[in-house]
Image: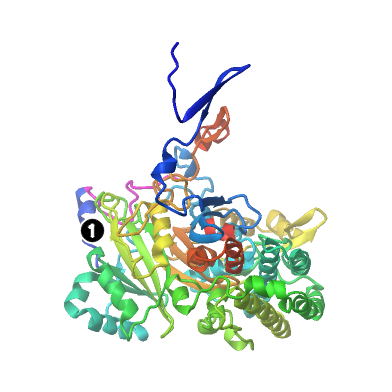
């Protein structure tokens, strides 16, 4: 494994004077109830935590990947062409027996179509589409333009009994990803949920509306900068304040 | 005051004053071109409705009794479980995920724990794996029986309901004896199990294995040959393999379309490849086939339980790594289930290091190396997938659950548009969605 650094993170760190990857120089994340001070309820790295620099998302694996991972990658290159593959797939990560392709959104539909239809790939089933917000996981100093929102696709080949993962990263300012609902109709609700929870807009989706939260809800609850709790509860003629403003939590 | 004549609001004098009766304006003439205008009806069904299998809302366009459009509205049971797990440590996550699909709590726990174990790179002891299979298969029977019971109730077969819940109670009694709770067990933990099987559990499961096949046969006598039951289910809720794959439908629905796709066979986990069992299928693609598949799966689960009992060897039920394993064993005290008295005496009276260890592990929890995994298992409703991301800390960075009910419910429109209103109920009952899992 090598750490390729990721061009999307490094400039932001330098600008902010980021020097030592172990120094917790800010960029921490607060937990629930709007705590002040350390907010640590456990005494051991509790609700406030400094994220390890890029530990989650910034490694990549060099070929050969091993096992059927190379077969699938070769078949994918055959299906879309080397030029498109090089352009579309930013990096590949093999970890814990699973393979992840990090894909640019421009080529997502072309890749997914090939993955579904090509004889040697045959990923018939889209098991899951969901989001992950990597806010602050790139290191203490975070470039606001860094693509923090990841859309994760889990595809299953029933023919070959294989599973792969595609990941598309976008920024919170431009959270647009093409919808795969035309290729996999099952992605309809998955994409609606990802929109609902993360605010990622799936262009071309037949009806991108909220699915779990009420239609008039503000914000996208699964984003990391959206607090847990803190929503005032309304009853007839009375409002229950959010937890962090109740006296017991002060 | 002058009064002008309004053709759409006739008025009359009453003791309360003048009352206007406002009629439909000129809408009658505007819609005159549509011959079915007076037959089209939009019906809102639910979310509080006894036949929608939970807090599910359906918006149905009807022409007469024919459904032309079926829209499904969900979210009434959304509780933010996925978000909550990000604020709790890895062990506490078990208690959240078990509440999602509340008819299959042990599958949620197993899927979550297997994902955490994959991230940790550990393997749980053999006895824990066998007991996991054992309790999950008991849970599968309970879940299928509830699916049958509530489905029967929605179709008016109330004996199916009373009998289904009665037999399910036997499963819940067993699970209560083993885990301490009827539902939401939090019994399967990262690294193994909360505790070993209690004394007498094996005997009680064997008694259950004696009784249950007779009860399954009773269901066949009660329902399978019954003309009303057959006519309510046959050719209802049709969905073939192509439709299933396009809509991502898995589980008994996919198997009722003839594809023997079962995670326990195609991607075995917990040693399922070493058990002898069949994957029942049907080729009818309808609610009838799903009923038969579920009933056959109950029998297969009984076979699996018997085999799991036979291969139970004494041994630990938790990994030996003290950095992961919960420091205390639970035991039954005079005031209920709690930490064993020996353990409390040890940490409070004998060893300060043990106390520190206990405190750190219980309050802070263990760290999980950064990375992400996707672990699919076969729940009673299909592929239950856990996508778990760790950033290397003591809490999950993200837990996303691919709940089979959520995905399968998308098939409602495909199954019921063009059918009769009463068949929508049968179609949804054959999907057997659990709204706790759909909305999470």
Identity of the residue drawn at 25% across and 72% down: A110
Q: Which colour scheme is used?
A: rainbow
Tell me if residue B233 comes above or below residue B266 in the rendering. above
Determine whether, in the image, residue A203 is placed left or right of residue B20. Answer: left
Residue that lies at the very extreme toward the left in this rendered image: A83
Q: Does the magenta stretch include residue B437?
A: no
Mark 1 lies on a secondary structure that is loop
Quadrant in the picture for the N terminus of chain A: bottom left
Residue A163 image position (x, y, % from top left): 41, 77
Residue A61 image position (x, y, % from top left): 30, 75
The residue beneath circle 1 is: A8
Total number of numbered discs in the rendering: 1
Q: Would you say the magenta stretch is mainly helix, strand or loop?
A: loop
Dot 1, how many residues are within 10 Å of its Cα: few (below 14), some (14-19), or many (20+)? some
Residue B110 image position (x, y, % from top left): 58, 69
Tell me if residue A113 comes above or below residue A64 in the rendering. above
Residue nearer the viewer, B111 or A60: B111
- Evaluate whether residue B71 shows in this view: yes
- Evaluate whether residue B317 shows in this view: no
Residue nearer the viewer, B293 or B107: B293
**Residue B428 occupies which quadrant of the picture?**
bottom right
Residue nearer the viewer, A85 or B64: B64
**Residue A87 occupies which quadrant of the picture?**
bottom left
Tell me if residue B220 comes above or below residue B34 in the rendering. below
Identity of the residue drawn at 77% across and 75% down: B222
Q: What stretch is highlighted in magenta?
A: A16-31
Residue that lies at the very extreme toward the top in this rendered image: B1
Q: Does the magenta stretch include residue A23?
A: yes
Residue A113 image position (x, y, % from top left): 30, 74
């Amino acid at each position: 494994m090598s750490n390729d650094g990721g061009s999307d993170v490094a400039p932001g760190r330098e600008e902010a004077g980021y020097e030592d990857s172990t120094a917790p120089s800010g960029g921490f994340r607060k937990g629930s109830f709007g705590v002040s001070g350390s907010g640590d309820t456990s005494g051991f790295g509790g609700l406030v935590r400094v994220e390890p620099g890029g530990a989650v998302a910034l490694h990549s694996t060099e070929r050969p990947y091993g096992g059927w991972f190379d077969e699938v990658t070769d078949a994918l290159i055959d299906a879309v062409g080397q030029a498109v593959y090089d352009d579309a797939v930013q990096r590949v990560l093999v970890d814990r027996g699973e393979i992840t392709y990090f894909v640019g959104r421009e080529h997502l539909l072309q890749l997914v179509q090939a993955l579904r239809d090509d004889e040697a790939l045959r990923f018939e089933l889209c098991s899951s589409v969901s989001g992950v917000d990597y806010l602050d996981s790139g290191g203490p100093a975070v470039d606001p333009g860094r693509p923090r929102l990841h859309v994760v696709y889990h595809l299953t080949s029933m023919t070959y009994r294989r599973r792969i993962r595609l990941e598309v990263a976008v920024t919170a300012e431009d959270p647009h990803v093409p919808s795969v609902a035309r290729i996999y109709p099952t992605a309809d609700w998955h994409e609606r949920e990802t929109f609902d929870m993360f605010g990622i807009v799936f262009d071309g989706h037949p009806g991108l509306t909220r699915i779990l939260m009420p239609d008039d809800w503000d914000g996208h609850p699964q984003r990391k900068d959206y607090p847990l709790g803190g929503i005032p509860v309304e009853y007839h003629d009375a409002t229950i304040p959010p937890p962090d403003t109740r006296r017991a939590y002060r | 005051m002058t009064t002008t004549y309004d053709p759409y609001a006739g008025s009359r004098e009453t003791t309360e004053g003048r009352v206007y009766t406002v009629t439909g304006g000129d809408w009658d003439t505007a819609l005159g071109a549509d011959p079915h205008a007076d037959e089209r009806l939009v019906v809102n069904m639910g979310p509080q409705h006894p036949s929608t299998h939970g807090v599910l809302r359906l918006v149905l366009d009807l022409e007469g009794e024919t459904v032309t459009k079926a829209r499904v509205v969900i979210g009434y049971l959304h509780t933010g479980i996925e978000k909550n797990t990000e604020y709790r440590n890895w062990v506490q996550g078990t208690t959240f995920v078990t509440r999602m699909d509340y008819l299959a709590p042990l599958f949620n726990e197993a899927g979550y724990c297997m994902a955490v174990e994959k991230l940790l790179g550990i393997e749980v002891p053999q006895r824990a794996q066998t007991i996991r299979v054992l309790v999950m298969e008991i849970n599968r029977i309970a879940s299928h029986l509830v699916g049958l019971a509530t489905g029967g109730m929605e179709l008016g077969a109330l004996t199916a309901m009373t009998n289904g819940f009665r037999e399910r109670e036997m499963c819940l009694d067993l699970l209560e004896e083993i885990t301490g709770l009827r539902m939401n067990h939090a019994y399967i933990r990262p690294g193994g199990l909360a505790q070993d099987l209690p004394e007498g559990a094996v005997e009680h499961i064997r008694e259950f294995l004696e009784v249950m096949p007779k009860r399954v046969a009773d269901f066949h006598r009660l329902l399978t040959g019954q003309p009303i039951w057959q006519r309510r289910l046959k050719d209802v809720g049709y969905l073939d393999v192509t439709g299933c794959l396009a809509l991502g439908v898995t589980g008994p629905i996919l198997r009722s379309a003839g594809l023997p796709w079962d995670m326990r066979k195609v991607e075995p986990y917990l040693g399922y490849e070493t058990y002898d069992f069949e994957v029942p299928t049907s080729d009818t693609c309808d609610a009838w086939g799903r009923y038969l598949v579920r009933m056959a799966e109950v029998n297969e689960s009984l076979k699996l339980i018997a085999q799991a009992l036979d291969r139970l060897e004494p041994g630990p039920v938790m990994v030996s790594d003290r950095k992961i394993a919960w420091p205390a064993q639970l035991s039954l005290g005079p005031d209920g289930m709690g930490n064993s008295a020996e353990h409390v005496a040890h940490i409070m009276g004998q060893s300060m290091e043990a106390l520190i260890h206990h405190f750190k592990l219980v309050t802070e929890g263990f760290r999980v190396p950064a990375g992400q995994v996707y672990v699919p298992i076969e729940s009673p409703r299909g592929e239950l997938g856990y996508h778990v991301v760790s950033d290397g800390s003591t809490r999950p960075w993200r837990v996303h659950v691919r709940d089979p009910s959520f995905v399968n419910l998308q098939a409602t429109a495909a199954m019921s548009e063009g059918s009769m209103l009463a068949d929508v109920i049968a179609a949804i009952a054959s999907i057997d969605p659990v709204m706790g899992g759909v909305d999470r």
